[in-house]
């Protein structure tokens, strides 16, 4: 058994689970300024109230797991992306505080301030995640098994573009979540927002995908050398087909199908990114085998993960089952 590959797969799964699950509740915060009625804002927030803090479990698992199983990657990535990652954590903290305190505000003015904090925290967390992803994609300079780049290497036009792409993607996830969980006027608004955001996300996927190919030679070689392009061509084709299906479901009145379609788009984009990276964990020079802990450590940690990950999946699934169904204006969060 290749324990390095197993752990690489588990870390990839944890990151994807976080992106999808925390992505839609960050998307609610991004859409918040567009909701005019206080009742709609309360309803939108109530749709994520039982889940938002549990969704962030996957971020803890991904960060802790990276430190334990791929310590060299952790030691390189953290100093390279120190600024965006610290800003992301501060934004998540502030967003969580705003989420709780808006319900305690005694005046409408005070509630509007916390609403602004909720939106700004959601935006900054989403944007910095995209910036960090873009910085990883464009490559991190490594020398003697340590970060050898500058303080601002992460800040480039490409990373700003990927940051915007993630913001749009999370907003689309949030809109489709509201389609699934709400009804009447709020659901109709969410359909309109999802329609526009789907076109914007499609544009951003195309721009980032093409731009990424010119960032490093291995990316271009992976996708456009024979016979790779025969095996990998279904990925962009499926993105196109699923995007058109999403637009159809938004217009035809689908409720759960738009949300599942967006998850599918995220999965295909993430899968394409993993294809481009493999076998590197820190492009362009550090592979998963170079960055991994000793095999004995990976075996030991796998025992704990074999218990912990199924438990997290089980209680997450149970919470979503318990709070299934529509949320209306009469539901309250305390």
Image (cartoon, grey):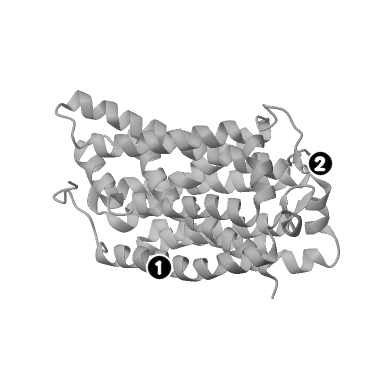
99 sits left or right of 273 in the view: left
Residue position for label 2: 144
Query: Measured along the vertical axis of the image, is residue 292 above or below residue 44?
Result: below
| Residue 254 visible, this angle | no
Q: Where, by quadrant of the figure, is residue 207 drawn?
A: top right
Q: Nearer the viewer, residue 312 or 162?
A: 312
Q: Where, by quadrant of the figure, is residue 225 drawn?
A: bottom right
Residue 216, position as x, y percentages in the image: 80, 45
Q: Disc 2 on helix, strand or loop?
A: loop
- Residue 104: which numbered mark, if any? none
The answer for how far apart the CA atoms under marks 1 and 2 are is: 39 Å
Residue position for label 1: 311
294 sits left or right of 253 in the view: right
Residue 87, position as x, y percentages in the image: 50, 32
Residue 84, position as x, y percentages in the image: 56, 34
Q: Nearer the viewer, residue 216 or 70?
A: 70
């Amino acid at each position: 058994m290749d324990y390095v590959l197993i752990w690489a797969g588990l870390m990839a799964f944890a990151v994807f689970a976080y992106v999808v699950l925390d992505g839609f509740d960050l998307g609610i915060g991004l859409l918040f300024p567009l909701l005019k009625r206080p009742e709609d804002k309360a309803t939108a927030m109530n749709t994520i109230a039982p889940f938002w803090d549990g969704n962030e479990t996957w971020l803890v698992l991904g960060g802790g797991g990276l430190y334990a199983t791929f310590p060299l990657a952790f030691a390189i990535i953290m100093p390279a992306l120190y600024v965006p990652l610290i800003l992301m954590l501060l934004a998540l903290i502030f967003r969580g505080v705003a989420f709780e305190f808006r319900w305690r505000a005694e005046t409408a003015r005070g509630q509007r301030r916390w609403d602004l904090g909720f939106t700004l925290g959601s935006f900054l967390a989403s944007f910095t995640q995209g910036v960090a992803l873009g910085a990883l994609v464009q490559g991190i300079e490594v020398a003697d098994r340590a970060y050898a780049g500058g303080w601002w290497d992460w800040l480039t036009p490409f990373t700003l573009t990927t940051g915007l792409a993630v913001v749009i993607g999370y907003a689309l996830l949030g809109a489709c979540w509201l389609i699934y969980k709400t009804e009447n006027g709020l659901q109709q608004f969410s359909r309109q927002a999802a329609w526009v955001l789907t076109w914007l996300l499609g544009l951003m996927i195309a721009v980032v995908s093409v731009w990424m190919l010119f960032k490093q030679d291995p990316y271009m070689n992976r996708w456009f050398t024979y016979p790779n392009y025969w095996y990998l061509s279904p990925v962009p084709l499926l993105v196109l087909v699923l995007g058109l299906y999403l637009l159809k479901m938004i217009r035809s009145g689908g409720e759960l199908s738009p949300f599942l379609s967006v998850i599918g788009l995220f999965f295909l984009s993430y899968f394409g990114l993993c294809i481009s990276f493999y076998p590197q964990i820190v492009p362009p020079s550090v592979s998963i085998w170079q960055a991994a802990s000793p095999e004995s450590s990976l075996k030991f940690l796998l025992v704990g993960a074999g218990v912990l990950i199924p438990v997290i999946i089980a209680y997450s699934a149970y919470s979503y089952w318990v709070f299934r169904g529509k949320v209306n204006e009469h539901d309250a969060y305390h």
